[in-house]
Image (cartoon, helix red, strand yellow):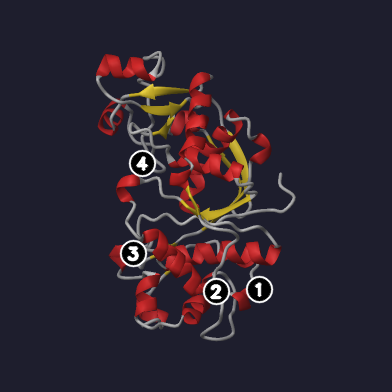
Amino acid sequence: MPTVPSSRLAPSPTGALHLGNARTFLINWLIGRQSGWNLPLRIDDLDGPRVKAGADQQALADLTWLGLDWDGQPIYQSHRLSLYQAAVNNLLNRGLAYPCVCSRKEVESAASAPHAEDQSVRYPGTCDGRFISIHDAVAKTGRQPALRFRVPPGPVSFNDNFFGPQTFDLSTTSGDFVIAKADATPAYQLAVVVDDAEMGVTHILRGDDLLDSTPRQLLLYRALGLDSSIPHYIHVPLVVGLDGRRLAKRHGDTRLSSYRESGVPPERIVAMLARWCGINPGHDEITARELIGKFDLANLPHHQITFDPAASHLS
């Protein structure tokens, strides 16, 4: 592990940052700054069709407007493709991954009923052992295959620094998962493992919608021989709308850029986010830097935060 602990801010340029994103980034930033961690920023821009032009610069502007900073220049995943390809080749050459030509529809029709807890569909292993290589898969089917990681049997356990002990058995719930798409773009699960290990990230703080990504990533850390780089995980409850669903466009315009353009002071946003983080800001407006030293993970609410526009006093 690196001498200096490290987290990372990792916005995805698939849309504008909203209040829910801002709360997670603020928590991450406060823990990092008051603990003396290194805090790089990485743009997770591999989801090609969903990446929006200019969204990366808007995210940087939004975070700066809130008063959040980071160490070094932004790092772009799209500039690191050779690292991901090396990891994919490693897994393929050792028989830990295999080509798969199944479409999403084929997986859903071949699998049994969706898993009751999350409505996910377990991949039934249709292409496991079917092809000897990527070239063989293309020659036999005329399709460019995705690549799946071969999930070993048995549970994966870890301790989340907020939710406590966790256990998942991917072999029975989701099965082998994609690590590279048919267009050779690395999947999220693989890319973040390669990046976080290479960047020396020791602590990952993110929304609890990614809690079930952690066992996949742990399997990849171990398969790639990166056991000593496995970070500490901290998953925090999401901000939701009045309907109980994750904050999104359906709940109105909660984009930071909209508040900025309409003249809402960033300090007012930060004060509201502080209350959502279990901090009493003492004022209706406060800067992010004034909150350093006041955040305690033990005081963070364990329930989801419900955003009520009428009660927010942001308009």
Q: Earlier in the sequence, mark 4 or mark 2?
A: 4
The local crowd at label 2, few if under 14, some if 14 to 19, many if 20 or more residues have their Cα within 10 Å, is many
Up-down relation of residue 96 to residue 44 (above or below): above
Locate residue 219, reporting x and y percent.
56, 33
State the CA–CA distance, disc 3 to disc 2. 23 Å
Res 39 quadrant in image? bottom right
Residue at 69%, 53% (x, y): give it: 5
The local crowd at label 4, few if under 14, some if 14 to 19, many if 20 or more residues have their Cα within 10 Å, is few
State the CA–CA distance, disc 4 to disc 2. 34 Å
Q: Are marks 2 and 1 in contact (CB under 8 Å)?
A: yes
Res 114 quadrant in image? top left
Question: Left or right of 271: which side holds 295?
Answer: right
State the CA–CA distance, disc 4 to disc 3. 20 Å
Q: Earlier in the sequence, mark 3 or mark 2?
A: 3
Q: Which residue bears the numbered disc 4? A: 119
Q: Amino acid at mark 2?
A: Ala
Mark 4 or 2, closer to the camera: 2
Q: Amino acid at mark 1?
A: Lys
State the CA–CA distance, disc 2 to disc 1. 9 Å
Q: Are marks 1 and 3 in contact (CB under 8 Å)?
A: no
What secondary structure is found at the residue carrying circle 2?
Answer: helix
Q: Is residue 96 visible?
A: yes
Q: Which residue bears the numbered disc 2? A: 274
Q: Which residue bears the numbered disc 1? A: 294
State the CA–CA distance, disc 1 to disc 3. 31 Å
Q: Amino acid at mark 3?
A: Asp
